Amino acid sequence: MSVFTHLVAELGRLLEPVLAQSSTAAAIVLFTVLVRLALHPLSRAAFRGETPAAGCLPMLLQLPVFFVMYQAFSSAEVGGKVNELLGHRLFAAPLGARWTEALGEGGPFGAQGLVFLGLFGAIAVVAAWSAVRGRRTAASVAAAAAAAADPKKPAGRVAPRGGAKAGTKPGTKGGSKAGAGGGVMAEVSAEQQEVMRKLGGVLPLLSFGTLITAAVVPLAAGLYLLTTTAWSVAERAWLQYRKDRAERLTVGGERSSL
């Protein structure tokens, strides 16, 4: 932890001529960005679905960083010395302060309370952005599943080897098997669509859980949560944009070749 505090303190000193007393808060944001840049290859692999574990690794690897951040702004001493980071501020609020402490220093609209309200507002905006994108993604997946399972959708017919002839009636043995198979597929697809619809309405709301965490951890840890959450949403939006752009270019190239 002493290595972390030293790194953040040095970054804060570099930014101090520009940001004055808020330089350490900016150093935390910069440190978080550096961590996310290091994890970007894993996030990109997770988005592409290259490895099953890649989606969990970026989140798991951030847990030790968050824990160190929490401890660094909760401990009075680091390495047997006074923790100098606790005296640093973001505007009027100490980076080691919690929201409950800010409420005792003038209430929610006091000098410290306003800093926390600004943090909560920024987290809420990022969470809402994440929720909207999550709902859109879930809706597109459900629509794609519905289109694939639509029995009225024209599809090529392939005669089964050794099966019924092309004129088989629905009442015959071959026709009844085909109808039963189609019904099962339609039923399973309908169940999957319902699950997707429910998950699409609930999962995006989990992003607002960051607000609860930010209300009970030190202000510095809340800054980390805000930065890493905003990075995650922006990173996924950028990767999706690049994917869609590549698909459009590919389709355009195929049409031009025709």
Image (cartoon, grey):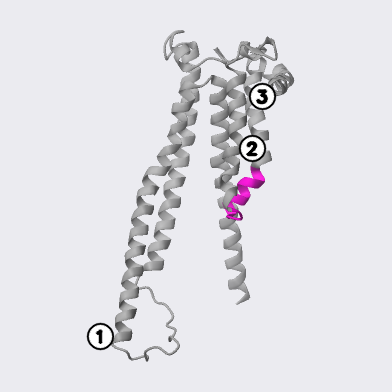
Of residues 52 and 219, the one drawn nearer to the viewer in this rendering: 52
Give the class, few, some or many, for how many residues have Cα within 10 Å of label 3's Cα (few <14, many ≥20). many
* Residue type highlighted by circle 2: Arg
Q: Earlier in the sequence, mark 2 or mark 1?
A: 2
Q: Earlier in the sequence, mark 2 or mark 3?
A: 3
Give the spatial CA distance, label 3 vs label 1. Answer: 74 Å
State the SS at label 3: helix
Give the spatial CA distance, label 2 vs label 3. Answer: 14 Å
Which span is picked out in magenta? Answer: 40-51
Question: Which picture quadrant has residue 28?
Answer: top right
> Which x, y percent locates residue 184?
33, 69
* Residue type highlighted by circle 3: Ala
Give the spatial CA distance, label 2 vs label 1. Answer: 61 Å
Q: Residue at coordinates 44% horizontally, 32% vertically from top-left?
A: 209
Question: Which picture quadrant has residue 24?
Answer: top right
Q: How many labels does the image show?
A: 3
State the SS at label 2: helix
* Residue type highlighted by circle 1: Gly
State the SS at label 1: loop
Residue that mark 3 sits on: 27
Q: Is residue 47 magenta?
A: yes
Residue that mark 1 sits on: 171
The numbered mark at residue 210 is none
Residue that mark 2 sits on: 36
Of residues 54 and 133, the one drawn nearer to the viewer in this rendering: 54
